[in-house]
């Protein structure tokens, strides 16, 4: 069953499938290094952050590989796929390098080198996000889909990509204040693995829940929510949840106080 799914996923978009597979392998390697290496950055095992980024990218790329087969404009899909390759080589390459030398990859302006690497990462992720926004636009623009696709699934894909893009740009808030904590400094006690602050508000919480709308909405549309109106109500409710989370963070409160 799993082998059939993997072969099906690979047949839908070979480039993104391999990006996801390499990222998943990277996450496993970083997870192992986080266990055996004593190297720390800001009081946290240095390889935890790259592990999370590799895993997040793997999930996102497997999702996009599955969904973009429905687009008629496959020329744009092929271009997007290679944009992902180049931008993620830059993004994850820098994150991995900084972990290896015991430096923070994000918000690190302690030297010209670190500041430049951080800016290059920002440029790469911006290009990736803008291209993803264009793919989302194509899904909204396209009116004809395979007959078996219900409106809930179609709108789940559209709104999932929309929320993903908006949440990706929400990361700019962290760049503006040059940290992810609100109400205190980065480095406070955090939850296991995720490392979201237990003491202060943490902008990464909204970032996480918003970006994983990319998986949540299409899954709901495929399995449960089959009408356009119902999916839009679900999305509006999810948006309200994200706004309330944002308010909580801006007031300096952790996810679970």
Image (cartoon, rainbow, N blue to C red):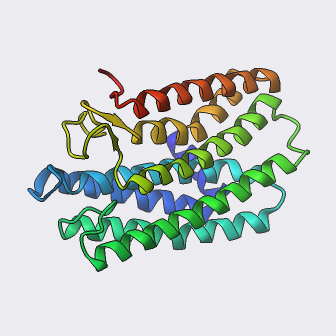
If the image is split into quadrants, where does the N terminus sit? top right
Q: Residue at x 50, y 62 (%)?
A: 19
Q: Residue at x 36, y 38 (%)?
A: 202
Image side of residue 187 versus residue 96, left or right: left
Residue 256 vs residue 99, the one in the foreground? 256
Residue 127 in the image, given as x and y percentages of width and height: 59, 67
Residue 126 in the image, given as x and y percentages of width and height: 56, 63
Residue 249 in the image, given as x and y percentages of width and height: 41, 32
Residue 179 appearing in the image: yes
Q: Quadrant of residue 101?
A: bottom left
Residue 75 vs residue 13, the one in the foreground? 75
Q: Residue furthest right?
A: 144
The vertical placement of 232 against 105, above or below, is: above
Q: Residue furthest left?
A: 38
Q: Residue furthest bottom?
A: 112
Residue 219 in the image, given as x and y percentages of width and height: 63, 31
Count up the numbered dots: 0
The vertical placement of 212 against 32, above or below, is: above
Q: Quadrant of residue 197?
A: top left
If the image is split into quadrants, where does the C terminus sit? top left
The vertical placement of 85 against 180, above or below, is: below
Q: Residue at x 14, y 49 (%)?
A: 43
Residue 58 appearing in the image: no
Residue 247 vs residue 237, the one in the foreground? 247
């Amino acid at each position: 069953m799993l082998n059939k799914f993997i072969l099906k996923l690979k047949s839908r978009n070979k480039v993104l499938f391999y990006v996801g597979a390499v990222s998943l392998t990277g996450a496993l390697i970083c997870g192992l290094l986080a266990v055996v290496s004593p190297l720390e950055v800001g009081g946290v095992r240095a390889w935890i952050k790259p592990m999370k980024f590799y895993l997040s990218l793997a999930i996102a790329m497997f999702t996009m590989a599955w969904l973009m087969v429905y687009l008629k404009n496959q020329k744009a899909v092929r271009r997007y796929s290679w944009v992902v390759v180049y931008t993620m080589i830059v993004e994850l390459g820098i994150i991995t390098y900084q972990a290896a030398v015991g430096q923070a990859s994000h918000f690190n302006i302690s030297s010209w080198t670190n500041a430049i690497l951080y800016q290059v990462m920002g440029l790469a992720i911006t290009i990736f996000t803008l291209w993803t926004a264009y793919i989302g636009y194509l899904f909204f623009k396209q009116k004809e889909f395979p007959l078996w696709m219900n409106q809930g699934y179609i709108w789940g894909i559209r709104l999932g990509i929309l929320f993903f893009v908006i949440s990706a740009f929400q990361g700019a808030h962290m760049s503006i204040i040059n940290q992810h904590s609100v109400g205190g400094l980065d480095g406070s006690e955090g939850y296991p693995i995720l490392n979201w602050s237990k003491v202060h508000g943490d902008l990464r919480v909204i970032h996480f829940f918003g970006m994983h709308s990319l998986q949540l909405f299409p899954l709901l549309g495929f399995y449960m929510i089959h009408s356009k109106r119902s999916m839009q109500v679900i999305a509006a409710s999810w948006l309200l949840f994200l706004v309330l989370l944002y308010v909580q963070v801006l007031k300096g409160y952790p996810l679970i106080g």
